[in-house]
Image (spheres, rainbow, N blue to C red):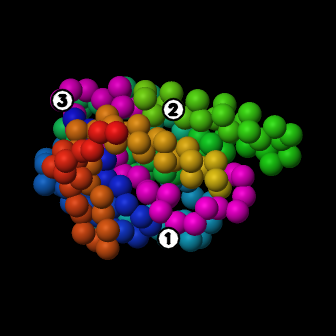
Amino acid sequence: MITLMIGGARSGKSSYAETYCLKKDKNLAYIATAQVYDEEMKDRVKKHQDRRKNNWDTYEEPYKVSKLLEEISGQYQVILIDCLTLYITNLLLVDFDDKNKDLVLFADKQEEIIKKEILAVLDAVSEKTELVIVSNEVGLGIVPDNFLSRTFRDINGRMNQLVGERADSVFFTVAGIPVKIKPDLERIQL
């Protein structure tokens, strides 16, 4: 089973995802995709760690989540990935060079790599394990003013669509309020 928890920045999606998982079972894994580059990020990670306490087996994996899932899936009843957005950022920036003469080709190549990895993540989970994925909805604001930001927004949006389509349930968090949007709400077919 796959569950997607999506929402904007500071919407409460991570807190809700953790609470959701804690209600399921005591056998929990947490895959953190963040990388710490500065004091602000260090503080954010610390707050997440403090909130989780010792209820989780924590894995830090910024680049190879599918391989990690292949190793640990089946050992846990619930695995939480927090977050898909940072994971996509990590994968997008692996070989990024802003002096590259063909950024469009670079972006297309990275999107294919990212898509393959996200599909591998979704396929790597054992039938005994529920995978809960936290992701940011980044497409509700203004159009970014630079190529890399627009590329990130577009890839993140398409990967959210991919995960949302495969997910058994999707929750959208707004102002700390989670709203179940799949499968409860009627889906309009175009």
* Quarter of the image where one finds residue 118: top left
Q: Which residue corresponds to mark 2?
A: 115
Among numbered discs 3 and 1, the one appearing first in the sequence: 1
Q: Say whether residue 11 is visible.
A: yes
Find residue 128 and name its label: 3
SS of the residue under disc 3? loop
Q: Quadrant of the C terminus?
A: top left
The answer to whether marks 3 and 1 mark residues whose Cβ atoms lie closer than 8 Å is: no
Amino acid, disc 1: Asp
Q: Nearer the viewer, residue 12 or 69?
A: 12
Q: Does 43 sit left or right of 162 as displayed?
A: right
Q: Marks 2/1: CA distance?
A: 30 Å
User: Which one is closest to the eye, mark 3 or mark 1?
Assistant: 3
Q: Residue at 40%, 70% (x, y): give it.
A: 10
Are there few (<14), some (14-19), or many (20+) residues within 10 Å of tag 1?
A: few
User: Which one is closest to the eye, mark 2 or mark 3?
Assistant: 2
The answer to whether marks 2 and 3 mark residues whose Cβ atoms lie closer than 8 Å is: no
State yes or no: residue 124 in magenta. yes
* Quarter of the image where one finds residue 173: bottom left
In this figure, what is the number of numbered marks? Answer: 3
Q: Residue at 41%, 37% (x, y): give it.
A: 162
Q: Marks 3/1: CA distance?
A: 34 Å
Find residue 43 and name its label: 1
Amino acid, disc 2: Lys
Among numbered discs 2 and 3, the one appearing first in the sequence: 2
Q: Which residues are magenta?
A: 121-148
Amino acid, disc 3: Lys
